[in-house]
Image (tube, rainbow, N blue to C red):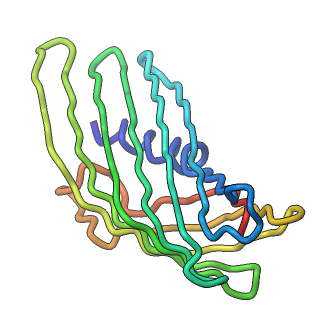
Amino acid sequence: MKKHFTLLLMHISFWSFAQIAMSSGNQNSRWTFGGGLGVGFGSDSYFNLQVSPRVGYKITDQLEGGLSGNVSWQSSNFYKSTMFGFGPFANYYFGRSFFIGANLQQYFINSTEKYSNYKFSTDETALYLGGGYMQNVGNNAFVQIGLMYNVLWKENRSIFSSGFVPSVGFVVGL
């Protein structure tokens, strides 16, 4: 099961965590909105659909805080699962090319093995810390490439197989 969550993290990293934050239309607005959508396919009829909405507020021109969430549906020949997560985030932007951030997520996971009908439910807290590089691609649009690490991750105790999460995203309105 951890292998499937590794695949999930890869899909989240490269597709779903691709965040697009938009100004609410007013250039003086400090609110940002965004999210991501991910779809993954794999062997054994593996399928994953993940949605990650977020809303933020620019506290200063460099500091943004807000709430993010995600929901993921996975299925394969062997199991099906649903994972919900939500929590606060903060990003600090400096030099208009770099950022550091923190994201606290509380995950709730429900899984069912298809052959035995065994049901498994758990929850896990993750505190992601990291940062990365930001490239302006025009107007107030940026591409972000970064790496986050879950400082609460424990090998053989976590539902996730690794504490590292690479991220690629887009931000508009910073």
Q: Residue 173 or 168: which is nearer the viewer?
A: 173
Quadrant of the frame with the C terminus: bottom right
Count of picture labels: 0
**In this image, 135 relative to 87: left or right?**
right
Q: Tell me the residue at 75%/79% (across/down).
A: 97
- Expressed as whole percent of the image width and height from the top left, the position of residue 81 reads 28, 29
Outermost residue toward the bottom? 95
Identify whether 147 is placed above or below 117.
below
Quadrant of the frame with the N terminus: top left
- Expressed as whole percent of the image width and height from the top left, the position of residue 170 reads 70, 56
**In this image, 46 relative to 158: left or right?**
right
Q: Tell me the residue at 67%/68% (across/down).
A: 29
- Expressed as whole percent of the image width and height from the top left, the position of residue 155 reads 24, 61
- Expressed as whole percent of the image width and height from the top left, the position of residue 114 reads 21, 14
Q: Residue 41 or 171: which is nearer the viewer?
A: 171
Q: Tell me the residue at 14%/37% (across/down).
A: 121
